């Protein structure tokens, strides 16, 4: 049996899934790997496109009818939230065109919750790597960025108007639930899949050098120092297991979003 597995080419995902993708976790099936930005995986998962897939927590209300949330392998944390960037110090959102990495990403949902009634005039969904150059050259008034952009945005001459992760943490006291791992119901046993992912995470931490070539090959020309920062920030205790705090963070995000009419309601996540 071959299962389809999709995750991003970002360093945290390739680090976490190196062992699983390379047949180093005992007792697993073969995997057909797809590397794609989260906006692509969010959309494909809505069609049941992958057996195991990394998606945004914000997309779960449209996916939990066909997928089970795994308690490990995802991206949650503190100090790792999305940033809203501009070329200056301020932006009038109500008159702005804002580039976002996906309309069902956690980043976009956090921005909508933060903005309240001051929603952007226009939203453009563009590939993640085009956002900062697009803001810098004036195609967009502001850009919503994730991942390694928090380390590299000053190189583009950009300013962070708000750190949405910091806002979320101050408002809720909870970590930011960014990316989740899902297993397709009826195809993959979630408990078994969770054991595979936990073992892949364990091997990643036990021998970080083993995945180095693989991670750098997919790192979109990031220098090694930025790759190391990225992994250190996004691969943490919540990657090994959500725990009570991780589940509380995800339920708080989706509960607030449903209460604001931004997403359909969901039930308990475990």
Image (cartoon, helix red, strand yellow):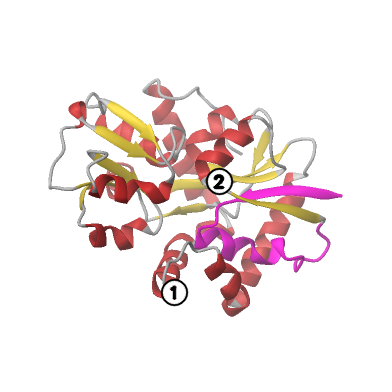
For disc 1, the neighbor class at 10 Å (few under 14, some 14 to 19, many from 20) is few
Instruction: Work out whether residue 22 or residue 97 is closer to the camera in this orientation and state it.
Output: 97
Relative to 12, is 34 on the left or the right? right
Residue lying at the far top in this picture: please name it: 261
Q: Disc 1 marks which residue?
A: 224
Measured from the top left, where is residue 36 in percent x and y? Answer: 57, 48
The answer to which quarter of the image holds residue 211 is: bottom right
Q: Disc 2 marks which residue?
A: 180
Residue at 54% x, 27% y: name it: 266
Specify start and end residues of the magenta stretch as a single range. Answer: 1-28
Image quarter of the C terminus: top right
Relative to 201, is 188 on the left or the right? right
Measured from the top left, where is residue 50 in percent x and y? Answer: 69, 41
Residue lying at the far left in this picture: please name it: 89
Q: Is residue 150 above or below residue 63?
A: below
Residue at 43% x, 67% y: name it: 222
Assess whether mark 2 and mark 1 are in contact (beta carbons under 8 angstroms): no
Relative to 159, is 83 on the left or the right? right
Q: Nearer the viewer, mark 1 or mark 2?
A: 1
Helix, strand or loop at mark 2: strand
Q: Is residue 37 above or below residue 220?
A: above
The answer to which quarter of the image holds residue 69 is: top right
Residue at 55% x, 40% y: name it: 40
Residue 158 seen: yes
């Amino acid at each position: 049996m071959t299962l389809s597995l999709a995750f991003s080419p970002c360093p945290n995902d390739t680090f976490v899934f190196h062992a699983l993708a390379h047949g180093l976790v005992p007792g697993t099936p073969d995997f057909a790997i797809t590397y794609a930005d989260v906006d692509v995986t969010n959309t494909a998962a809505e069609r049941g496109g992958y057996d195991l897939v990394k998606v945004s927590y914000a997309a779960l209300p449209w996916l939990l009818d066909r997928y089970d949330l795994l308690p490990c392998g995802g991206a949650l944390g503190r100090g790792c939230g999305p940033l809203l960037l501009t070329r200056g110090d301020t932006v009038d959102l109500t008159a702005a065109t804002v580039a976002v990495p996906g309309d069902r990403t956690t980043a976009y949902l956090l921005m909508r919750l933060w903005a309240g009634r001051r929603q952007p005039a226009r939203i453009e969904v563009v590939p993640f790597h085009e956002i900062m150059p697009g803001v810098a050259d004036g195609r967009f008034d502001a850009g919503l960025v994730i991942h390694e952009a928090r380390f590299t945005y000053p190189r583009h001459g950009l300013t962070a108007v708000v750190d949405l992760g910091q806002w979320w943490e101050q408002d809720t006291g909870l970590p930011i639930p960014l990316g989740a791992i899902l297993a397709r119901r009826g195809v993959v046993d979630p408990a078994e899949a969770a054991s595979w992912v936990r073992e892949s995470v364990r091997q990643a931490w036990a021998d970080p050098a083993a995945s180095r070539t693989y991670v750098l090959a997919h790192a979109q020309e990031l220098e090694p120092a930025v790759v190391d920062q990225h992994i250190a920030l996004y691969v943490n205790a919540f990657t090994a297991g959500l725990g009570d705090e991780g589940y509380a963070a995800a339920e708080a995000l989706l509960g607030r979003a449903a209460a604001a009419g931004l997403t359909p309601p969901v039930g308990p996540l475990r």
